[in-house]
Image (cartoon, helix red, strand yellow):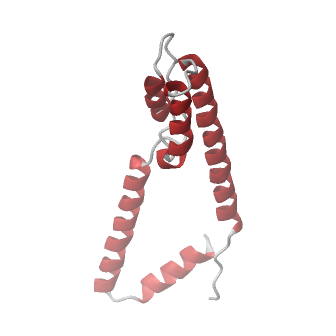
Amino acid sequence: MTPDARRLIRFFSDLPDEDKKTLLAFAEFLANRSEAVERNRPSPVPIPIPRPETETVIGAIRRLASTYPMLNKAEMLNETSSLMGEHVLHGQSAPEIIDKLEAAFERHYRDFSSKADDDRDEGQAVTTETPS
């Protein structure tokens, strides 16, 4: 049993019955909230959607946004719109731009994954020991 679990049991044991019920209700609320957050979180893994033979740049952006739902699209807006401009204003072919879009989404996903790994590592390295 962890030190935190022992502390919690000690605190719980010292509470009057009515406060024990309140603490249990609150713990149940927190557990349910955590489950709901987990259920509503976008997939941390890309959802592969095959690239159609003929695809527009807009269609590719939509496909890639669905493939990578975990990415913050606002952070990618500048790069995505710049690539769209290369297509519309400078006449680069759709397949060329789509290749660049796929590379951009993949790069953002790698960054996202490495940040998630770093956050997980930091969370494991942090200990919350308090004196008993």
- The residue drawn where x is 52% and y is 32% is 85
Q: Is residue 39 left or right of residue 114?
A: left
Residue 45 visible to the viewer:
no
Q: Is residue 121 left or right of residue 18?
A: right
Residue lying farthest to the front in this orientation: 89
User: Which part of the image, by quadrant, shows the C terminus?
Assistant: bottom right
Residue in the image at 47% along x and 16% along y: 55
Q: Where residue 107 sits: x, y (%)?
A: 65, 38
Q: Is residue 35 left or right of residue 90?
A: left
Q: Position of residue 87 (x, y in %)?
A: 53, 25
Q: Residue 120's quadrant in the figure?
A: bottom right
Looking at the picture, does residue 104 appear above or below residue 74? above
* x and y percentages locating residue 50 in the rendered image: 51, 18
- Number of numbered discs visible in the structure rendering: 0
In the image, residue 118 above or below residue 113: below
Q: Nearer the viewer, residue 131 or 12?
A: 131
At a point 35% along the width and 66% down the height, the residue shown is 28
